[in-house]
Amino acid sequence: MASKKNLHLVHDDKFIDMAYRVFESVYPGGNHFISFSNSKVNRYIKKAPVVIYSIWSLVLYRFFPFFMPKYDVVFVHGLDSEKLQYLRLLGDGVKICWIGWGYDYYDYIDCDLLKSKTKNYEYEVKGLDEGFFCKCKNYLRSFVLGRVDKESILNRVDCFAPVLYEDYELLKRNIEFSCPKYIDWNYGTLEEDWLDGFGDGYVDGDNILLGNSATNTNNHLDSFELIKNIGMDGSKIIVPLSYGDCVYRDIVIREGEAVFGNRFCPLVDFLQIDEYIKLISSCSIVVMNHVRQQAVGNIVIMLYLGAKVFLDKKNPVYLFLKRQGVMVFNLDELHYESRVRLDLSDVEVNRSIIRKHWGRDVIYKKTKNLVESLRSS
């Protein structure tokens, strides 16, 4: 008989603690979190009781499937190769909810995510980040585990919760197979995660927050050209680079210091959320030069605190926020809008809209609806 627990397939990321708290609130004691990794400890997960299995346990499940624990509902937090391997071994009748992160579905969306200057450095990142031994290990693992047809797995998925509905529409337009049913769900609440202890605060400086990670889809090098010409020479450029590609990170630091000197402030160490918010509260300007959906948590925090946020016009986050009535700006407006703070009345409008999407009661209600819809169907 199937267990009454929900299985959550996760990887080591700060969002998993948020997911654990809200899922346990609506289904207490009914959630089992596991990850497949050759690391014995989690770096970013602090509270969720995640059981870590070796990646090679997937080989055991493949040849001896009776060893697999039985579940009737599986939540997939980001669809990477290990989770795909696990999903293909599931028996019939298991309900699957795919909680998309972006990296796991943008390979189906036909758009160029890199801008010109960043693209010119792409060759330098490739080939350096994966050595011969690593390539051999990945090849061996692929050979032993077998190839997975991602589309066949997606055809088994019962519902799909991307970061934004706009991403769902993009995916539907770009795939040839049937897209899973959309369901609305997001990580984190304003009160407990994004702004715990900072709900009454406002930005109080003239620094600039640029990007959210050491990934090339931030288009940092193109952003340097935008920022250096806006006439804010006294501002520090705060650049989060604590996770992502270390080779790309080093390129960003090298080029950033060449352009901005000691004004360039890379964040290479992971900070606790309260430390991080204290630091970025000094930024009245936020530049996110992504073409794809990314950095939503940072954007939500900074909008709530009253910063002016500048996004690419093609970014689904920009389209979503504009559709909701949020006072947000596109990168073409950076030159003349960066010198004036956001009016307090506009800040309050932004706060009201953000609470409707990321407030505690809203997220908990979404989670309850998600669990009940899968367990009752």
Image (cartoon, rainbow, N blue to C red):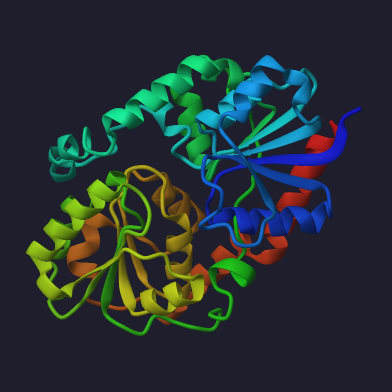
The image quadrant of residue 229 is bottom left
| Residue in view at x 39 percent, y 80 percent | 203
Residue 233 placement: quadrant = bottom left
Residue 347 image position (x, y, % from top left)? 45, 75
In the shown orientation, is residue 103 left or right of residue 225? Answer: right
Looking at the image, which is closer to me, 275 or 168?
A: 275
Q: Residue at x 71, y 22 (%)?
A: 90
Residue 190 seen anywhere in this rendered image of the structure:
yes
For the C terminus, the quadrant is top right
Residue at the image position 65 percent from the left and 18 percent from the top = 62
Along the line of sight, the residue nearer the viewer: 136 or 368:
136
Q: Quadrant of the N terminus?
A: top right
Q: Is residue 12 above or below residue 54?
A: below
Report the number of discs: 0
The residue sitting at the left extreme is: 258
Of residue 216 and residue 29, the one placed in the foreground of this image is: 29
Q: What percent of the width, then of the height, locates residue 358?
A: 60, 61
- The image shows residue 121, relative to residue 266, as above or below, that is above
| 219 to the left or right of 271 | left
Whether 367 is drawn above or below 273: the answer is above
- Residue 180 image point, x, y percent: 62, 26
User: Which residue appears at 27% of the width and 39% of the height?
Assistant: 129
114 lies left or right of 105: left
Residue 229 appears anywhere in the view: no
**Image check: 36 left or right of 138?**
right
Where residue 368 sits in the image (x, y, percent)? 78, 50
